[in-house]
Amino acid sequence: MALIDILPVVLSGGSGSRLWPLSREKYPKQLLALTGDDSLLQATLRRTQGLQGLAVRSPLIVCNEEYRFVIAEQLRQMKLKGDVVLEPVGRNTAPALALAAFQAMAAGDDPVMLVMPADHVVLDLKAFQAAVQHASPIAAAGGIVTFGIRPFAPETGYGYIKLGRTHGGADALAWSIQRFVEKPDLATAQQYLDSGDYLWNSGLFMVRASVWLAALRVCRPDIEEHTAMAWSHRTTDHDFVRVAADHFARCPSDSIDYAVMERVAGSESAGLGPLPTGVVVSMDAGWSDVGAWESVWQVMPKDPQGNAVLGDALMIDSHNSLVVSEGRLVACCGVDDLVVVETADAVLVTHKDRAQDVKKVVERLKEQGRGEWQVHRKVYRPWGSYDSVDAGERFQVKRIMVKPGAALSLQMHHHRAEHWIVVKGTARVTCDDKQFLLSENESTYIPLGKTHRLENPGRFDLEMIEVQSGSYLGEDDIVRFEDVYGRQ
């Protein structure tokens, strides 16, 4: 008997504004390591490793163009190869999954897609894999499977699924979907919990690529049409599949639930033509969408006083609090039920009960024209990273790391000069028509208006200090002449 062909599909969109300041628009929460050494994205990919009785392919990731190189680097760290499809603009999960389905069928195959958001936490790997194994034959036979979480509290932050008949006779793990329910108020959520007839909607799915596209053609033909056009005009850019931006921008924005799943539930598919069966499989695997800091506290290990700590923290007579420190020591004395998050450029302090309101901080930062909502002080680039360690009138100091074999673009600045000091490794420097090497403790000067490039010819990271001086020091003062990464 042939094994069912499974394609892990990871949807890596979204900004994660409710986990600010650790999460930023250009470095969202799926790229963060919150519950271990792996980022949430890496942990999601690892869940599919070791699935028994299934033929698991290399993964397919659909992500925002802004952080494509960080995702590629995290795949490289795992020694994992896979397809990365870029969304030129965000259009929610239904179009993203359509792009994945087109890519999945590009070689003439029709795998079962295991669709996973990149930013969820699953603590019980065995239970997760057992649920996937249970759902696989249902999806392989043409059904659309979603995974439901047995609620343990009247949660108002999740959508719910009302269970219909058991699927497959006496099967106690799968049911037909009677209906989807929006996030309820507290009293309604308590009723759902007491009835035992509802599961939390996890946002995880299993469906054949062809079945998803056929369902879209029935339910949302406009989404299927625009995504098909965007994918048919795709190009390959290094390790990325880049769909046509103009066609994809015309695609309506909609979620998997709204576009298709609600229409295959119960009697709502009447009059729409043939649709696949919608099935929900129960999964008790320590799942959380970590949608707010209070959720992060719930899934993290805790000390006897209920405190969860990530980084350097000192807790004295404090209880049930979450402390995250990226660098500095955070000391808490006599506090309860707080969230404290320290980064290089921002500190958040909030009561756990107000954790959902962190997005209001992000909105206020946008209104004030500040940059802390969008990027960290440390910024990742395809060649490495830079950290803006100090700045003042007419100067800026950066710590730069260039990966082995990597090179910055051949470029020029109109308004600033630069001084480069090698701290560790070897640098190859191009300045106009000259090219030379710099070793540790050596430096050079790049005058304003000179064409220049920095490369790392060595086998180890190149670490440098860059001092910029001039009338304007913005990142947009750059003219690129050559760039191996295809940036403009």
Image (tube, rainbow, N blue to C red):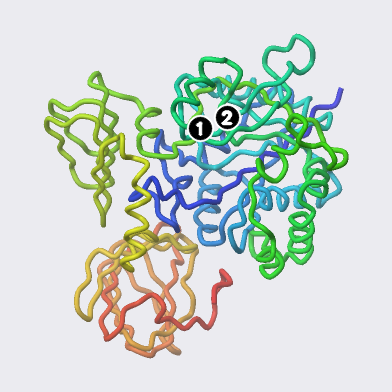
Picture coordinates of residue 289 (x, y %)? 49, 35
Picture coordinates of residue 51 (x, y %)? 66, 26
- Crowdedness of circle 2 by 10 Å Cα count: few (<14), some, many (20+)? many
Q: Residue at x 34, y 45 (%)?
A: 357
Q: How many labels sit on residues?
A: 2
- Crowdedness of circle 1 by 10 Å Cα count: few (<14), some, many (20+)? some
Eye-nearest disc, 2 or 1: 1
Picture coordinates of residue 329 (x, y %)? 18, 42
Front residue of 436/246: it is 246
Q: Amino acid at mark 2?
A: Tyr
Q: Considering the image in quadrants, where does the C terminus appear?
A: bottom right
Front residue of 29/404: it is 29
Rendered position, 422 above or below 364: below
Q: Using the numbered discs, state the Cα–Cα distance from disc 2 to disc 1 in whole angstroms.
A: 8 Å
- Which residue occupies the extreme front position in the image? 187
Q: Which residue is mark 2?
A: 160
Q: Residue at x 68, y 63 (%)?
A: 248
Q: In the rendered structure, which disc, 2 or 1, sits on the residue that comes first in sequence?
A: 2
Picture coordinates of residue 16 (x, y %)? 45, 48
Which type of secondary structure does the marked residue at label 2 adopt? strand
Q: Residue at x 87, y 38 (%)?
A: 274
Which type of secondary structure does the marked residue at label 1 adopt? loop
- Which residue occupies the extreme top position in the image? 170
Q: Which residue is mark 1?
A: 184
Tell me the quarter of the picture where residue 146 sits: top right
Front residue of 157/83: it is 157
Q: Considering the image in quadrants, where does the N terminus appear?
A: top right
> Taking 379 as reference, is 397 left or right?
left
Front residue of 224/323: it is 224
Circles 2 and 1: CB atoms closer than 8 Å: yes
Tell me the quarter of the picture where residue 471 sits: bottom left
Q: Residue at x 42, y 85 (%)?
A: 412
